Image (spheres, rainbow, N blue to C red):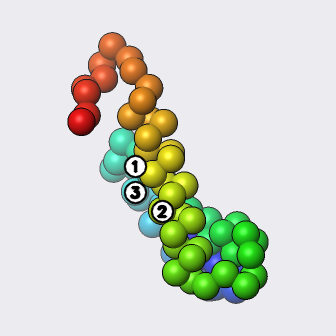
Amino acid sequence: MPFDFEEKLRFYAGLALKRLRAISNGVVVVDNGSLFNIGSEATLKQLYQVANKEAVKALGSLLATQSEDSIPVG
């Protein structure tokens, strides 16, 4: 999702997110505003590294969850 200062993009990002949720099995949402709160001294590259680590962690927990319909992914 857009940074807080990108207020004009929030509507379009929300619309795109709604469409993605309708056609996909899952969506990982990264709120840039909350990333920016990690540290105002952090570079954009560092913020995206944090976002990538969090996305990997979220996907890892989803893949680790087993159900009767689960397909093993290796």
Q: Residue at x 33, y 50 (%)?
A: 23
Residue that badge 1 annotates? 22
- Horizontal arrangement in the rendering, residue 60 relative to residue 13 (left or right): left
Residue 5: percent from the left, percent from the top? 70, 86
Q: Quadrant of the N terminus?
A: bottom right
> With 18 as the anchor, is 11 left or right in this view?
right
Q: SS of the residue at dot 2?
A: helix
Q: Position of residue 12 (x, y in %)?
A: 51, 75
Q: Is residue 10 above or below residue 20?
A: below
Left or right of 39 in this view: 19: left
Q: Secondary structure at mark 3?
A: helix
Q: Residue at x 62, y 65 (%)?
A: 31
Q: Is 26 rendered above or below residue 6? A: above
For label 2, the residue is 52
Task: Name the element at disc 1.
Answer: helix
User: Does 31 sit left or right of 59 as displayed?
Assistant: right
Query: What is the CA distance from the residue labelled 2 to the residue labelled 3?
Result: 19 Å
Q: Could one spot residue 15 in this view of the protein?
A: no
User: Marks 2/1: CA distance?
Assistant: 23 Å
Task: Give the amino acid at mark 1.
Answer: Ala
Q: Identify the residue at horizontal 69%, vertical 75% (top origin).
A: 36
Pick whichever, 48 or 20, lies toward us: 48
Q: Earlier in the sequence, mark 2 or mark 1?
A: 1
* Label 1 close to label 3 by CB (< 8 Å): yes
Q: In the rendered image of this protein, does residue 60 appear above or below residue 12?
A: above
**Residue at x 33%, y 13% (from the top left corner):** 68
Which residue has dot 3 on it? 20
Amino acid bearing label 3: Leu
- What is the crowding at mark 3: few (fewer than 14 residues within 10 Å), some, or many (at least 20)? few
Residues at marks 1 and 3, CA–CA distance in whole angstroms: 5 Å
